Amino acid sequence: MTHHQLPHALLAWLRGAAHIVVVTGAGVSQESGIPTFRDALGGFWSRFDPMQLATPEAFDADPSLVWGWYEWRRTQVLGCQPNAAHRAIAELASHARRLTLITQNVDGLHERAGSRDVLCLHGSLHRPYCRGCGRPHALPREAPGQAPRGQPMRPPACPACGDHIRPGVVWFGEMLPADIWAASEEAAGACDLLLSIGTCSLVYPAAALPQVAHRKGAKVVQINPEPTSLDPLAALNLRGTAAHLLPPLLR
Ligand code: BV8
Ligand code: ZN
């Protein structure tokens, strides 16, 4: 079923749910001015394919190029604010009997909007660590000074072992953090309502979460301006943007 405004059924499902799971993708940060993953290339980076850059092989082959891309994205994010969608999701958690927020995003905007215990399936731009010994590395709070135009810059060296510091994200071909994946899969299997917001539902295993919920009898609701592979499985497809459709949920 496809709708362009909020049907009353959803308000009843939200109020009646014992456990709501929210799964978000890059679309929920789009109205904060952060381009979605496939659009996450501008200027200097437009000649690259994000699917190629977001891999351990790319970092091993050219650490400065990949580190530069992530620092450029981190700079973008530090200059952006959470939007009404992030705030509505944080607010929903205080109304719901139980709400588990799972995100594929690495921008940290859910936390900045007040959401707590966010399950970050794909890591974070703000938690880099050493490729060699895994030691966490603190980045300066402010955006990197040099190379603001997204030119490559060398990754810092680990003070403990000297290897490269790498972005704290999960790259294609890398395992998701086992504890975070286990908690996400468990929540999807236990919830009675799953909201999938702003994701193309193409990246696994994240894209399997609505299927896990559906198999266990939960209702799946999707918010996305475009149809995705999740459409047939959703009880409700709300065609619109997250910042526009989510705030009325709280009335
Ligand atoms: C793994 C962090 C085990 C990095 C990311 C073949 C078939 C099936 C699977 C595979 C396969 N080959 C390889 C795989 C596995 C692979 C995979 O799924 N590939 C896909 C492309 C087929 N997965 C992995 O590798 C995962 N690991 O499987 O481990 C393993 C281990 C070893 C060997 C094999 C397997 C790791 C995946 C994690 C990758 N890291 N991010 C970084 O950010 O740089 S994923 C990255 O892309 C994002 O996090 C996001 O999740 C994903 C998708 O990007 P986008 O499409 O841009 O974003 P999104 O999905 O959110 O789409 C935007 C949506 O929002 C759109 O639908 C749009 O319509 C909508 N929208 C836009 N504006 C708005 C909006 N919606 C609402 N409001 C708006 N305003
Ligand atoms: Zn190290």
Image: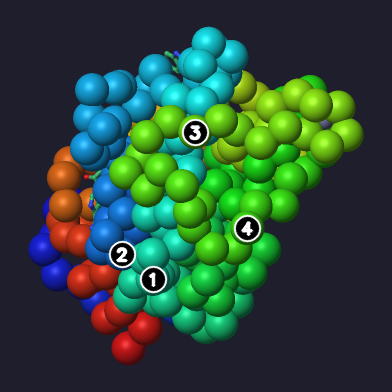
Question: Does 62 sit above or below residue 98?
Answer: above
Is residue 192 or residue 52 the one in the foreground? Answer: 52
Q: Secondary structure at mark 4?
A: loop
Q: How far apart, in angstroms, are the residues tagged by discs 2 and 1?
A: 6 Å
Q: Are marks 3 and 4 in contact (CB under 8 Å)?
A: no
Q: Position of residue 212 (x, y in %)?
A: 53, 38
Write down the residue under mark 3.
153
Dot 1 alpha-carbon crowd within 10 angstroms: few under 14, some 14 to 19, many 20 or more: some
N-terminal-most mark, 3 or 1: 1
Q: Position of residue 69 (x, y in %)?
A: 42, 35
The mark nearer the N terminus, 2 or 1, is 2
Image coordinates of residue 122 in percent, x first then y, are 56, 39
Q: Is mark 3 within 8 Å of ligand 1?
A: no
Q: Residue furthest front?
A: 146
Residue sitting at x 23%, y 39%: 42
Q: Is mark 1 within 8 Å of ligand 1?
A: no
CB atoms at circles 2 and 4 under 8 Å apart? Answer: no
Kind of residue at badge 3:
Met
Residue at the right extreme?
160
Q: Say whether residue 205 is left or right of residue 4.
A: right
164 lies above or below 197: above
Q: Secondary structure at mark 1?
A: loop
> In the image, ligand 1 is in what quadrant?
top left
Label 1 belongs to which residue? 81
Q: Quadrant of the C terminus?
A: bottom left
For the residues bearing labels 2 and 1, Cβ distance under 8 angstroms: yes
Residue highlighted by disc 4: 140
